[in-house]
Image (cartoon, grey):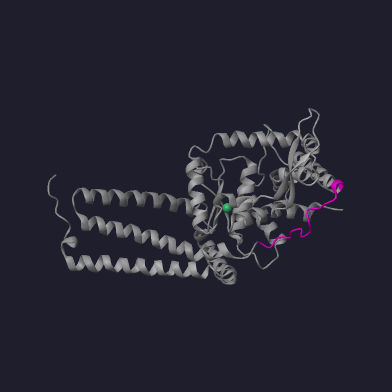
Amino acid sequence: MAEVKQPRLFEDKKRYKKRVSGKCVAIGVMAGVLIIFALLKLSVEICEWYSRNISSALIKAANALTGWLPFSVFEVLIYLAAALTISFLIFIIVALCRKQFKRAFNSFVDLALVVFIVGTVYGAFAILPYNRKEADIPLYQGTTELDEEAVYAMAEEYIDALNALSRSVERNKNGELIIPGGLEGLNESLQNTYEEVLTSDYFYDTDSHLKKWLWPELMSAFSISGVFFAPTAECNVCTAYYTTSVVAAAAHEMAHSKGAVREADANLVSYYIMLNSSDDLVRYVGYYTLVSDMLDFIVGVNLDPEGREELMGKLSDEYFADVRFAAQYAEKQGALGGVGSFFNDLYLKLSGLEDGTDNYSPQDEGDMVEISPGENGEAQTVLRITAFNDVKKMLVEMFYQK
Ligand SMILES: [Zn+2]
């Protein structure tokens, strides 16, 4: 290979040293800031104070910058980050091939600098909130010993309400659910519900907007139905999925923007919002999403798998059609779903959620018990719930009447 002269800068040792060491100092300072965040994160009280006073203010400020833009700034940043990383890597490889080690090292330091700047900005928004208190949602505090008949009545009423909603919501001529006001209307409806229903100071008084992507297929290829990225304060939702997923993702990402940072909290808050919405579509998606959790009471409390089947059989044709539509839409997506969940799991673990993606839905606790044999004489074992998860506690608090 022909000898290629290094640019002047890299020949001048003094200038080179000054330039690179300046950037290394900046990286060191940012690493120090990140370590301070990690130490402060150990105290729930500090995290709670920081979330309510600093994070919420940062998200409000970011929303003032990005909220009025009709596209997702986060999506644009993703493309820029990808282009930048690839350019840096090519630059470094070329420099190494030409044996321009100083130049390669300088580019590597530049790349590290960019990574640290993004990490520190993100950290300022989101590191501490991961260890704040649990989301302030009304939960049932009693034992799991519920009256069996009242449990059946609760599930039956729930299914009646779900069926009525499944028939009243707007659909197109194929019978698919539509969002009557589009994403804009959904944004307004959810914002209003959040404002009316969540009055606790726990939740941020933010107004982060729902944003759809110019290239939603990219998001869905990774099986991502939504992303809230705090530094741009945008609730990104993937419109390549069926309406039930779009509405649920919108409510979930908005919960993040209101301060429910951990996944289980964001789910819990979004479920509570959907079930309490005065918008039929949003309320329907809430009922639709939690139908299995509600039917689980029949087995987990009543130890009656047949009762569960019986209630399943009462669900409307419209409900089952929506389950099929949702599956059909999802089938076409997720070509890179494994990559998507790998990085999400890694990200959640780095954020301090030891269970990673399992954090989305904590399980009930219970004992396996044998119940009387069914018609074919085989012994059956079912889970008897001894401790409800938070979603169940919320459902009991909302729907159980003895
Ligand atoms: Zn989430």
* Closest to the observer, 383 or 117: 383
Above or below residue 170? Residue 394 is below
Residue at the image point whose x is 83% and y is 44% from the top: 152
Residue at the image point whose x is 52% and y is 38% from the top: 334
Quick check: 217 left or right of 381?
left
Residue 138 painted magenta:
yes
Residue 362, how many percent across, how many down? 64, 51
Residue 248 painted magenta:
no
Residue 228, how many percent across, how many down? 54, 55
Above or below residue 12? Residue 74 is above
* Closest to the observer, 8 or 337: 337
Residue 268 in sight in this render: yes
Write down the region rendered in magenta.
135-149
Q: Main secondary structure of the magenta part?
A: loop
Residue lying farthest to the left in this orientation = 3
Q: Quadrant of residue 11?
A: bottom left
Residue 278 in sight in this render: no
Residue at the image point whose x is 49% and y is 41% from the top: 338
Above or below residue 55? Residue 311 is above
Residue 189, how many percent across, how many down? 68, 53
Residue 299, how many percent across, how many down? 77, 42
Quick check: 208 left or right of 103?
right
* Location of the N terminus (image quadrant): top left
